[in-house]
Amino acid sequence: MRRSKQLGKWVIAVAAGTLVLAAACTPSGDDDDEGSGGGELVWAIGGAEAQPAGVDQKIADLWNEQNPDNPITIEVLPDEADQQREQQVNVLQSGSDEFDVLGTDVIWTGEYSQNGWLESLEDVRDQIEPEVLEGAFNSAQWDGELWAAPFNTNAGFLYYRTDLVDQPPETWDELCQIAEQVGQQEDIGGLIGQGFKYEGFVVNWLEYYWSAGGELYNEDNSEVLFDTDLATQTTEFMQNAMDDGCFAPGFNTATEEEGRAAFQSGKAVFMRNWPYAYQLIQDEGVPQVAKNFDIAPLPTFTGEGTISALGGFNNAVSAYSSNKDAAKEFVVWAATDPEVQKMLATVASVPPVLTSVYDELQNEPDMALLSEVLPDAKPRPPAPTWNTISVEMQDALFPAYNGDADPAEASDTVADAFNESVEE
């Protein structure tokens, strides 16, 4: 697969942020000795990578070998980002020092920093900024200040069965035609993705909407560009895909891991998922799938280019940590250590943020595809109330694509949510 652009020239403007309405306690941070001692660190992070056999545990083990005075243990959070955020917020709102390092989705930076939950990393900016992808670094900033260290970036892939599909489709309509035809012939589901009612569904919906030419805001996010007609067409496409068999059974109840399980067990022709699934399918998939699948850019409605939502996770230091100095050392190390970043890519197919790793691994299929997809990946908007907007989108669009609400009325509801975000 070709490398379409030089990584050093990538400019992926990523901003994150959502405001939690509940008030948060703000630590004073005035005690010079606060957080300077040794002792165990707790890293609160979720997803498949955080499980006992996952790459995050291997990274923690490597840190512990090198830093026996400040060992780190993982507090395994749920797989879904929404539930990870909920668990972290519950601890942070209480002012507890239970977590030292927070694995944070790129869209949480603004919310967490504005609520006083994060320790500023401005003092270590020069150790991180020159080494990592620009888009990943931007996602760790809010209001011009660095609040987290990039850990991994992300973009969506199309996974497909090479024994059932000759060439990956370039348009969503073509994908549905193949999915329905092969599905009927082989008695297999079509496309599995993240269709459950959570943030992952919003990401999937946005990829359809963006690939139809839709936008959310203008460049500086001062004006709403949400197109209700395109939004209605997007939701109707998903509704038809549910009805016609383009979407695999269980699409509307699937998260990342349910999607992976369906695809690797041979229950779907196509899958939309993040790169992390690439190695896992090879390792855990049934032989028929593990030996007969490939990855490609996500289709668009026009067949031109590719559009993916930009994802990723950063590591932040809790403002309530009792060991902030060691926590800072850990998050800088995880972002810039070549062995750590290469481990993400080679062990788990998790996209690293260290620029040099991509050049070293450019012959790996997943890394090569990332170099093609990431430059055109789109961030979710840097609206300070993104979590509120996301919930509104889930409440309106999920029942609409499942046939329980009118797509046009759902689009109007979502448009109102975006307009209110600008007015605020």
Image (cartoon, grey):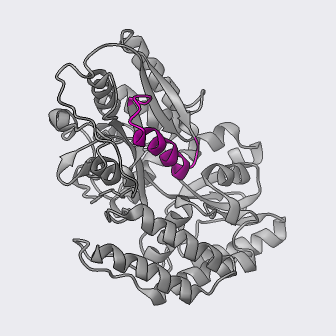
Left or right: 365, with 418 as reference point: right
> Is residue 208 visible in this depiction of the protein?
yes
Quarter residue 119 falls in: top left
Q: Magenta residues?
A: 78-100
Where residue 122 sits in the image (x, y, percent)?
Answer: 17, 38
Q: Residue at x 56, y 31 (%)?
A: 54
Comparing 193 with 366, the one in front is: 193
Q: In the image, residue 35 lies at what x, y percent?
A: 27, 22
Horizontally, residue 108 falls left or right of residue 248, namely left
Q: Quadrant of the N terminus?
A: bottom left
Front in this rendered view, residue 208 or 81? 81
Q: Is residue 77 above or below residue 295?
A: above
Count of marks, rendered view: 0
Quarter of the rendering containing residue 330: top left
**Does 85 lie within the magenta span?**
yes
Q: Nearer the viewer, residue 214 or 161?
A: 214
Is 85 above or below relative to 19?
above
Q: Is residue 134 visible?
A: no
- In this rendering, position of residue 51 left or right of residue 13: right
Q: The C terminus appears in which quarter of the rendering?
A: bottom left
Where is residue 321 shown, x and y percent of the image?
A: 34, 28
Specify whether residue 126 is painted magenta.
no
**Depth check, front residue: 58 or 10:** 58
Residue at the image point whose x is 46% and y is 38% from the top: 91
424 w.r.t. 289: above or below: below
